[in-house]
Image (cartoon, rainbow, N blue to C red):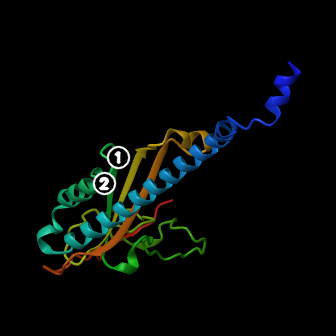
Amino acid sequence: MFARIKNLHGDERGVTLVEFALIAPVLIVTIMGVFDFALNFYMKSVLEGAVQRAARDSTVEQYANSPGGRDAQVTSAVHSVLPSAQLVFTRAAYTNYADVGQAEEFTDTNGDGTCNNNEPFEDINSNGIWDQDRALDATSGARDTVLYTVEVTYERKFPLASLIGFEDQVYLRAATVLRNQPYNTQDVSNATGNCTI
Protein backbone atom coordinates (compact mmCIF):
# COMPACT_ATOMS: atom_id res chain seq x y z
CA MET A 1 0.00 0.00 0.00
CA PHE A 2 2.83 2.40 0.85
CA ALA A 3 4.39 1.57 -2.50
CA ARG A 4 1.26 2.66 -4.29
CA ILE A 5 1.17 5.95 -2.43
CA LYS A 6 4.84 6.45 -3.21
CA ASN A 7 4.12 5.91 -6.93
CA LEU A 8 1.34 8.52 -6.86
CA HIS A 9 3.76 11.15 -5.59
CA GLY A 10 5.43 11.57 -8.97
CA ASP A 11 2.37 10.81 -11.13
CA GLU A 12 1.17 13.91 -12.99
CA ARG A 13 -1.59 12.27 -15.01
CA GLY A 14 -4.86 14.14 -14.57
CA VAL A 15 -3.26 17.38 -13.38
CA THR A 16 -4.45 19.24 -16.47
CA LEU A 17 -8.01 18.16 -15.81
CA VAL A 18 -7.86 19.37 -12.21
CA GLU A 19 -6.32 22.71 -13.26
CA PHE A 20 -8.97 23.17 -15.94
CA ALA A 21 -11.72 22.42 -13.40
CA LEU A 22 -10.34 25.19 -11.19
CA ILE A 23 -9.96 27.75 -14.00
CA ALA A 24 -13.06 26.89 -16.08
CA PRO A 25 -15.68 28.78 -13.99
CA VAL A 26 -13.69 32.01 -14.09
CA LEU A 27 -12.95 31.56 -17.79
CA ILE A 28 -16.61 30.89 -18.66
CA VAL A 29 -17.87 33.88 -16.67
CA THR A 30 -15.24 36.11 -18.30
CA ILE A 31 -16.12 34.94 -21.82
CA MET A 32 -19.85 35.42 -21.20
CA GLY A 33 -19.17 38.88 -19.78
CA VAL A 34 -17.19 39.83 -22.89
CA PHE A 35 -19.98 38.53 -25.14
CA ASP A 36 -22.61 40.39 -23.12
CA PHE A 37 -20.63 43.63 -23.27
CA ALA A 38 -20.00 43.19 -27.00
CA LEU A 39 -23.69 42.53 -27.74
CA ASN A 40 -24.80 45.58 -25.76
CA PHE A 41 -22.16 47.76 -27.41
CA TYR A 42 -23.18 46.53 -30.87
CA MET A 43 -26.88 47.04 -30.06
CA LYS A 44 -26.14 50.63 -28.95
CA SER A 45 -24.31 51.26 -32.23
CA VAL A 46 -27.19 49.83 -34.27
CA LEU A 47 -29.69 51.95 -32.35
CA GLU A 48 -27.66 55.16 -32.74
CA GLY A 49 -27.19 54.52 -36.46
CA ALA A 50 -30.87 53.77 -37.02
CA VAL A 51 -31.97 56.89 -35.15
CA GLN A 52 -29.51 59.08 -37.07
CA ARG A 53 -30.61 57.64 -40.42
CA ALA A 54 -34.29 58.07 -39.56
CA ALA A 55 -33.57 61.66 -38.53
CA ARG A 56 -31.84 62.41 -41.83
CA ASP A 57 -34.70 60.88 -43.80
CA SER A 58 -37.37 62.70 -41.81
CA THR A 59 -36.00 66.17 -42.49
CA VAL A 60 -37.12 66.10 -46.10
CA GLU A 61 -40.70 67.10 -46.85
CA GLN A 62 -41.98 63.68 -47.96
CA TYR A 63 -41.12 62.16 -44.53
CA ALA A 64 -41.98 65.13 -42.31
CA ASN A 65 -45.55 63.98 -41.69
CA SER A 66 -44.68 60.28 -41.35
CA PRO A 67 -43.57 59.57 -37.79
CA GLY A 68 -44.82 55.99 -38.15
CA GLY A 69 -42.53 55.43 -41.12
CA ARG A 70 -39.58 56.78 -39.14
CA ASP A 71 -40.40 54.52 -36.20
CA ALA A 72 -40.79 51.49 -38.49
CA GLN A 73 -37.35 52.17 -39.96
CA VAL A 74 -35.72 52.21 -36.50
CA THR A 75 -37.74 49.18 -35.34
CA SER A 76 -36.63 47.20 -38.38
CA ALA A 77 -32.95 47.95 -37.73
CA VAL A 78 -33.18 47.03 -34.04
CA HIS A 79 -35.25 43.88 -34.63
CA SER A 80 -32.75 42.66 -37.23
CA VAL A 81 -30.34 42.19 -34.31
CA LEU A 82 -32.74 41.50 -31.41
CA PRO A 83 -36.27 40.55 -32.54
CA SER A 84 -37.60 40.53 -28.95
CA ALA A 85 -36.51 44.11 -28.14
CA GLN A 86 -39.21 46.55 -26.99
CA LEU A 87 -39.04 50.11 -28.39
CA VAL A 88 -40.61 53.34 -27.09
CA PHE A 89 -40.56 56.48 -29.25
CA THR A 90 -40.95 60.08 -28.08
CA ARG A 91 -40.84 63.37 -29.94
CA ALA A 92 -40.77 66.94 -28.78
CA ALA A 93 -40.85 69.90 -31.17
CA TYR A 94 -39.37 73.35 -30.59
CA THR A 95 -39.20 76.52 -32.68
CA ASN A 96 -35.38 76.46 -32.75
CA TYR A 97 -32.35 74.56 -31.41
CA ALA A 98 -31.84 76.90 -28.44
CA ASP A 99 -35.32 76.05 -27.11
CA VAL A 100 -34.68 72.30 -26.70
CA GLY A 101 -35.35 71.33 -23.09
CA GLN A 102 -35.88 74.93 -21.95
CA ALA A 103 -38.71 76.20 -19.75
CA GLU A 104 -41.15 78.84 -20.95
CA GLU A 105 -39.97 82.33 -20.03
CA PHE A 106 -41.81 84.24 -17.30
CA THR A 107 -41.46 87.54 -15.48
CA ASP A 108 -40.38 86.77 -11.92
CA THR A 109 -42.01 89.80 -10.24
CA ASN A 110 -41.54 88.50 -6.69
CA GLY A 111 -37.97 87.18 -7.25
CA ASP A 112 -38.58 83.67 -5.90
CA GLY A 113 -37.46 81.88 -9.10
CA THR A 114 -40.85 80.17 -9.51
CA CYS A 115 -43.64 80.94 -11.94
CA ASN A 116 -46.50 81.71 -9.53
CA ASN A 117 -48.71 84.49 -8.10
CA ASN A 118 -50.24 85.44 -11.45
CA GLU A 119 -46.84 86.34 -13.01
CA PRO A 120 -46.96 86.72 -16.81
CA PHE A 121 -45.32 84.05 -18.96
CA GLU A 122 -44.79 83.44 -22.67
CA ASP A 123 -46.98 80.48 -23.66
CA ILE A 124 -44.74 79.04 -26.41
CA ASN A 125 -46.72 75.82 -26.85
CA SER A 126 -50.15 77.52 -26.54
CA ASN A 127 -51.51 75.09 -23.94
CA GLY A 128 -52.60 77.79 -21.46
CA ILE A 129 -50.24 76.79 -18.62
CA TRP A 130 -46.57 77.48 -17.82
CA ASP A 131 -44.37 74.49 -18.66
CA GLN A 132 -40.91 73.40 -17.50
CA ASP A 133 -40.36 72.21 -21.09
CA ARG A 134 -41.61 74.42 -23.92
CA ALA A 135 -42.07 71.54 -26.37
CA LEU A 136 -44.89 71.84 -28.91
CA ASP A 137 -47.59 69.20 -29.29
CA ALA A 138 -47.12 68.68 -33.04
CA THR A 139 -43.71 67.66 -34.37
CA SER A 140 -44.20 67.90 -38.11
CA GLY A 141 -44.36 71.65 -38.69
CA ALA A 142 -42.10 73.45 -41.15
CA ARG A 143 -38.72 74.44 -39.70
CA ASP A 144 -39.55 72.78 -36.35
CA THR A 145 -36.61 71.48 -34.35
CA VAL A 146 -37.54 68.00 -33.16
CA LEU A 147 -35.96 66.05 -30.31
CA TYR A 148 -36.44 62.42 -31.38
CA THR A 149 -35.78 59.82 -28.66
CA VAL A 150 -35.89 56.02 -28.83
CA GLU A 151 -35.69 53.78 -25.77
CA VAL A 152 -34.97 50.06 -26.17
CA THR A 153 -35.26 47.34 -23.54
CA TYR A 154 -34.43 43.67 -23.94
CA GLU A 155 -33.57 40.64 -21.84
CA ARG A 156 -29.89 39.80 -21.43
CA LYS A 157 -28.83 36.95 -23.70
CA PHE A 158 -26.22 35.58 -21.28
CA PRO A 159 -27.83 34.31 -18.07
CA LEU A 160 -24.68 34.50 -15.94
CA ALA A 161 -24.71 38.31 -16.08
CA SER A 162 -27.35 38.45 -13.35
CA LEU A 163 -25.17 36.26 -11.10
CA ILE A 164 -22.41 38.86 -11.10
CA GLY A 165 -24.63 41.83 -10.33
CA PHE A 166 -26.06 43.00 -13.65
CA GLU A 167 -29.77 43.60 -14.20
CA ASP A 168 -31.71 40.99 -16.20
CA GLN A 169 -32.90 43.68 -18.62
CA VAL A 170 -30.75 46.01 -20.69
CA TYR A 171 -31.96 49.57 -21.23
CA LEU A 172 -30.57 51.67 -24.09
CA ARG A 173 -31.51 55.20 -25.15
CA ALA A 174 -30.64 57.17 -28.25
CA ALA A 175 -31.69 60.70 -29.13
CA THR A 176 -31.10 63.15 -31.92
CA VAL A 177 -32.20 66.65 -32.75
CA LEU A 178 -33.36 67.32 -36.30
CA ARG A 179 -34.76 70.27 -38.18
CA ASN A 180 -37.74 69.93 -40.53
CA GLN A 181 -37.29 71.38 -44.00
CA PRO A 182 -38.69 74.88 -44.70
CA TYR A 183 -41.47 73.69 -47.00
CA ASN A 184 -43.92 76.15 -45.45
CA THR A 185 -44.05 79.09 -43.03
CA GLN A 186 -43.28 78.06 -39.45
CA ASP A 187 -46.10 78.48 -36.94
CA VAL A 188 -44.82 80.53 -33.99
CA SER A 189 -47.00 81.25 -30.96
CA ASN A 190 -47.12 84.77 -29.52
CA ALA A 191 -49.58 83.78 -26.77
CA THR A 192 -49.09 84.89 -23.18
CA GLY A 193 -50.62 83.75 -19.91
CA ASN A 194 -50.44 84.24 -16.19
CA CYS A 195 -48.84 81.80 -13.73
CA THR A 196 -51.02 80.17 -11.12
CA ILE A 197 -49.94 79.11 -7.65
In the image: residue 86, left or right of residue 107 = left
Mark with earlier residue (1, 2)? 2
Q: Residue furthest left?
A: 62
Q: Quadrant location of the N terminus? A: top right
Say which element carries label 1. loop
Relative image position of residue 86 (x, y in whole percent): 34, 46
Front residue of 172 and 38: 38
Residue name at image x 23 percent, y 78 percent: 143
Q: Position of residue 99 (x, y in %)?
A: 39, 76
Q: Amino acid at mark 2?
A: Val
13, above or below 108, in the image: above
Q: Is residue 60 left or right of residue 108?
A: left
Q: Would residue 65 be seen by someone viewing this image from the given angle?
A: yes
Count of number-bearing discs? 2
Label 2 near label 1: C-beta < 8 Å? yes
The residue depicted at 50 percent of the width and 38 percent of the height is: 159
Q: Nearer the viewer, residue 151 or 21?
A: 21
Please say whether residue 126 is visible from this viewpoint. no
Residue type (three-letter) at the residue carrying disc 1: Ala
Q: Position of residue 193 (x, y in %)?
A: 37, 69
Residue count near mark 2 (Cα–Cα under 10 Å), binned few <14, some 14–19, many ≥20: many
The residue carrying mark 2 is 78
Which SS class for mark 2? Answer: helix
Q: Which mark is residue 50?
A: none
Residue at point 42% right, 68% down? Answer: 194
Using the image, determine if residue 189 lies above or below residue 66.
Answer: below
Residue sitting farthest toward the top: 1
The one of 138 and 152 positioned closer to us in this rendering: 152
Q: Residues within 10 Å of mark 1 (few under 14, many from 20)?
A: some
The residue that disc 1 covers is: 85
